[in-house]
Image (cartoon, helix red, strand yellow):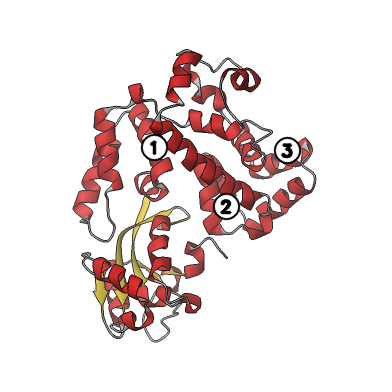
Amino acid sequence: MSFGKILKIIEEKDFLEHKRKIKKEVLKVNKWLLNPRELNKRKMLSVFRFLSKNAERKILNKHLNDLQFLLIHIVEKPKENRIKDLKKYYGLLDEDVEMIKFLMYPKKFPPGGYEGKLKKYGIELYTPKVIFKRLPFKDYIDLYALMTYIPLDEKNPFIQNLLDEILKIDPLEDKKSYFKKVIEIYKSLSDFEKHLLNMQLKNFSYYHYKLLNTDSVKGLVIDGSNVVRYENRNSLQFLIEMFDNMYFGKIAFFPIHIVFDNNIEFFLNEEDKKVLKTLSEKRRVYFNSPADEMIVYIANKFGYYILSNDKFKEYDVDPKKLLKIEDFKFDN
């Protein structure tokens, strides 16, 4: 593929939208990595979107404080020997190290593995310096957007249809049998087809990407009232926003049940009340007082996890399956 054809691609509406999403995501992660003390487990899951499964596994196996210390060391003085300390401590692959450097300093370093990802365009032998001369890129984020974009002539109608079906999977609505059927179809794909599908899933919905690429899919019961009233927010939108983050470490959650107390409307504004009405039409959304009784019943009957800051001391609940709200939000 010539530079001329690439110039046409990067003018496409789809590419421009893709680039916008990529830039937003990279800059978000960049901000966190340059302020390591603000990193938490939830933010690290966004960082892992850019790294290999090998890097995710090795970093998760150690304490977050270790990573924060090494990153602070780099931020204070971004020398190559300090980056090598990070690589050595975790045993990271060169491509992951290069990707971390890119995420921290996207104006200075190209993304890891860019040569291989640019093979589809036939420009993998060109240096970033030459590519920047031939293409109207402002920084390496634009190059990363090109790396992760699926050109129209490579889009497979079957893959696109399957992508649409996967993105429609609703953990509050769809049956487990339907989800298993989608998983079976995914597993039947060739490695190349999975690659095309996963590249797009990572950009559209990391939750759905995790659903298809983890061996640990578990059910979850959300204490709806507890989440809504978290830190006296009284916000249903806070709960809705968490639905993009229904994964934790190696676990992706499906199906998901939400249980509200009967009086939840009392704490909501008029806009949230309208949203609650729509949400209540979902198959796995319930209202019960006390909500705890139904939450524990569902969790114990099916062996599901519970998301709540309540400790359920008066009930027989496995403490290892109690998840805290803090682990599912970014702003702590």
At x 79%, y 49%, the residue is 76
Residue topped by disc 1: 200
Question: Is residue 28 something one can see in this rendering?
Answer: yes
Name the kind of residue labelled 2 in the image: Asn
Q: The N terminus is located in which quarter?
A: top left
Q: Nearer the viewer, residue 295 or 280?
A: 280
Quarter of the image with the C terminus in it: bottom right
Q: Given this view, does label 2 or label 3 mark the residue nearer the observer? A: 3
Residue 188 visible, this angle = no
Q: Are the residues tagged 3 and 1 within 8 Å (C-beta)?
A: no
Between residue 238 and residue 44, name the one nearer to us: 238
Figure check: 52 above or below 264:
above
User: CA separation, marks 3 and 1?
Assistant: 31 Å
**Place of residue 304 in the rendered image (x, y in percent of width and height, measured from the top left):** 33, 66
Q: CA distance from mark 2 to mark 1?
A: 28 Å
Q: 92 or 26: which is nearer to us? A: 26
Coordinates of residue 153 in the picture (x, y in percent): 34, 21
Three-letter amino acid code at disc 1? Gln
Q: Is residue 159 above or below residue 250?
A: above
Q: Which residue is mark 3?
A: 84
Identify the residue at image location x=64%, y=59%: 38
Are there few (<14), some (14-19), or many (20+) residues within 10 Å of tag 3? some
Which SS class for mark 1?
A: helix
